[in-house]
Image (cartoon, rainbow, N blue to C red):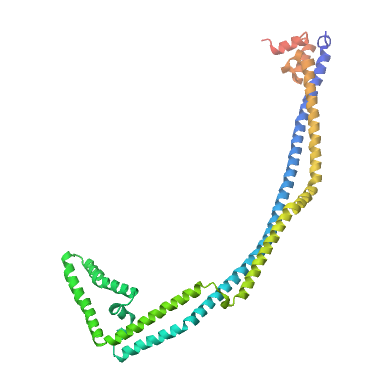
Amino acid sequence: MGLETENPVEFLTRARTAVISYNETQKSLTKQREVEKQASRALDQAKRDMHDKTEKTLKAREAEISASYDQQIKEVEARLKKATALREKAKNEGIKGRIQAETEPLLTENKELKRQAGTVLSQDHAPIFTHTGLFYWLFKPSGFKEILIFILTFLLAFAVIPIGIYYMIPSRQSLYLVPIYLVDIILLGGLYLFINGQTNGRHREAISMARGLRNQIKANRRKIRAIAHAVHTDANEEGYHLQEYDDDIAKAQQDRTDIITQKQSAENTFATVTRNIITDEIESAARSDIERLAAEFSSATKARSALETGEKEQALRLSGEFEQFLGKKHMNVKDIDTIRHMLDKQEAISIVDAVSKLDHPAK
C-alpha cells in the first residue's frame, strides 16, 4: 500500500507542495526565457552597432581619400583644358597669319584686277549694273556656278513666276496660262533682250575685257582656297611657335598621371592596411561591452537550461507520484484542496473516491 491510501492527507500535502513548486519553476522559466531573449537582443544590437559603425567609418574615410585626389585631378584637368584651348587658339592665329601671308599677293592682285575692270567699264561709259556680278551671271556666265545660276534664274522667270501667278487667280482655267506666259515672255524676255542688246552692242569689248578680268579674279580665289586648305591640312606646326603650350600640356598630363597613380596607391593602401587598422580600433573599443553582453547572455542561457532541466524533472515527479492518482486535470492547488476538504468532511472515503466524485458529481 502507498502513502495515498495509508496517509492520504500527507500525500495531498506533498502533492500540493510539488504542484506549487512546479508552478513557481514554470514562472521562473518564463521569466528567464525573457531575460535570455533580452540578453540575446542586446548582444545582437551591440554587434550590429559595431558593424554599422565600422562600415560607415570605412565608407567615409574611403570617400574622403577619393574626394581629395579627385579634386586635384579636376584642377589639373582644368589646367590641361585651358592649355589645350590656348594652344588651339595660338595655332588658329598662326594658321590665319600664314594664310594671310601666303595669299596676300593674290588678294592684292584681285583688288587691282577689280579696279582695272571698273576702270575699263567706266571709260567705256557702260551702265552701272555692268559692274555687278549679277550682270555677268545672266549675260556673260562663265563656269559651272554661274551657268547654274543662269539656268535657275531662267526657270524662275519663265516657269515659277507664271505658274505662281496662275495659281493665285481665284477662278483659274488652263487657258489663262497662255496670256500669262505671253505677258511674262514679252516683259521679262523683252527686258532681257533689250539689256543684252544695249550692253553687248555698244560695250561688247569693254564687257569682254571685264569678263576676262573677273575670270582671273575667280582663278585667284580658287588658288586662295587651295592655299587655305593646304595650310589647314599641313601637319607641320613648327612655324606656329607652340612649344610653350606643348610644354604646359605635357606638364599637366604628367601631373594628372602622377595624381592618378597616387590615388590608386592610396586606395590600395587603404584596402590592404588602413581598413584593417580602422576595423581593429572600432572592434577593440566595442570589445568590452560585447564581451559583457555575451557573458550576460551565456549566464542567462545556462540559467534557462537549468530551469528547463528542473522543470522536466518536476513534471516527471508529478506524473510518476501524484498524477496517476489525482488525474492530470486535478494537478492544481484548488482541486487538491477540494479533495482534502472532502476527506476531512468524510464526503469521500479515499482519494480515488474524491477524484471520482469530482469527475462525476452527483445530481
x, y (%) of residue 149? 31, 73
Q: Residue at x 62, y 75 (%)?
A: 243
Residue 24 makes an appearance in the image: no
- For this rendering, which residue is in front, 243 or 220? 220
Q: Residue furthest bottom?
A: 123
Q: Which residue is drawn at 28% across and 72% down?
A: 151
The quadrant of the rendering that contains the C terminus is: top right
Q: In which quarter of the image is residue 106?
A: bottom left
Image position of 240 (left or right of 357): left
Image position of 51 (left or right of 212): right
Q: Residue at x 78, y 49 (%)?
A: 280
Residue 159 makes an appearance in the image: yes
- For this rendering, which residue is in front, 290 or 338? 290
Q: Residue at x 15, y 66 (%)?
A: 175
x, y (%) of residue 161? 25, 71
Q: In this view, does 164 lie above or below 64?
A: below
